[in-house]
Amino acid sequence: MPDRVVVTGLGVCAPNGVGVSAFAKAIQEGTSGITFHQRLADLQFGCQVAGTPQVSPELLSLYFTDLELRGLKATGLQYGVIAGMDAWQDAGLQPTLDHPDYDSGIIFGTGILGVDKFREAIHLIDAGRTRRLGSTAVLQTMASGISAYLSGKLGCGNQVTTNSSACSTGTEAVLMAYDRIRAGKATRMLAGSCGDSGPYIWGGFDAMRILPSQFNDRPEEASRPMDSQASGFVPGSGAGALVLESLASAQARKATIYAEVLGGAVNSGGQRGGGTLTAANDEAVQRCIQEAVQASGVSPAELDAINGHLTATSKDSTEIKNWCEALNRRGQEFPMINSLKGMTGHCLAAAGSIECVATVLQIHEQYVFGNVNCDVLHPEIEEWIAKDRVPTQTQTQALNLVAKASFGFGDVNCCVLFKKF
């Protein structure tokens, strides 16, 4: 019989907290990490606010050697290494020194990596100064640079790879890691995702007019999931990481077990039936949720809470409708639901993993964090669920089963269920 899979380590580099302790405190207290960025204003962005982790040179020196730091411009790689190494240490694991750990692997996703390094490289190459690129240009700019970098730091000898599925990337990485352990192909996996920060990442979204522009003088109020004034997602960046491990291994090591991964599902709407590059096929979303519940061996009625995708756009009400239809629960019978994005913005490829960390923390500590800036619930959402299902303040709550879902550009979906151990 396949072994059960549990979470034994957490790491996070988020706009509102770097490190699990700081992040846990921030989400319980409703602390925002969204700030005004003068550089965005100078570049005449409509949206001049964003969520970016506060990473000092002193902090970076704890994870990178002086040689590694020379020319290191890939912010997503920095965030990912911090979160990944923290999760490994939090799980009570140490890097191997002399030989690979063939029982341990890495699935660490990203959307695009090293944009600032790309920009530097283009200028140097065009100027005929290719040899000035440095020895890390390739590592910083290939998508799998993050998983390769972490493998070198930790010595993992099982599967080491990078996935990329837009906003679903981090949640999908967790499910892929779960599947590998359940299949008996690995004992433990470091799963997570990361994303770069800066105008070259966020510019395309600003050009699409899907970012809010009326809160530049009130950055902490800009990201408003499920609120009646929601007017677009605030861009963010960072990284989240989880160590997934077979239950037998975790118990043999006497490791801390934060939660159990029960199962999940991944699919695509195929950009059919109303689905497009930027909008989800509702039927596919509902199928993904239903298949995740079924794969986990539970009933929809057992779900205590949902950490939704909920980006603070007009699609929030559609997402709530899809949850109601998929679970056949609405009104007062609907689970508690929240969105981290009111505090962090939408961290794009990093969103799913950061939000998985938040979901697991809620289960481990038995609370539901509040929906920051959801001052007046959107009337279309209120047609489906009761107001008290959308807490605005952190509440102590007995949580046994929580769903985390991500729905990404390209009409791709992923849903994972976590359970109290």
Image (cartoon, grey):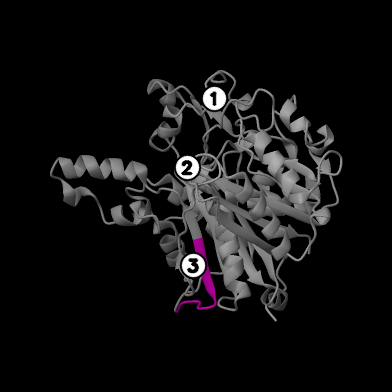
Secondary element type, mark 1: loop
Amino acid carrying mark 2 in the image: Leu
Q: In terms of image quadrants, where is residue 39? A: top left
Q: Earlier in the sequence, mark 1 or mark 3?
A: 3
> Does the segment drawn in magenta span residue 317?
no
Give the residue pinned by disc 2. Answer: 277
Residue at position x 72%, y 65% from top?
256
Name above or below for residue 326 compared with residue 391: below
> Does the segment drawn in magenta span residue 103?
yes
Amino acid carrying mark 1 in the image: Pro
> Callout 1 environment at 10 Å: few (<14), some (14 to 19), or many (20+)?
many
Secondary element type, mark 3: helix
Q: Earlier in the sequence, mark 2 or mark 3?
A: 3
Q: What stretch is highlighted in magenta?
A: 99-107
In three-dimensional space, the C-alpha distance between marks 2 and 3, rounded to whole angstroms, equals 37 Å
Residue at position x 39%, y 58% from top?
145
Amino acid carrying mark 3 in the image: Leu
Report whether 43 appears left or right of 302: left
In three-dimensional space, the C-alpha distance between marks 1 and 2, rounded to whole angstroms, equals 20 Å
Which disc number belongs to residue 212? 1
> Callout 2 environment at 10 Å: few (<14), some (14 to 19), or many (20+)?
some
Report whether 13 appears left or right of 379: left
Residue 280 percent coordinates (x, y): 56, 43
Residue at position x 53%, y 20% from top?
216
Secondary element type, mark 2: loop
Give the residue pinned by disc 3. Answer: 154
Name above or below for residue 12 compared with residue 388: below
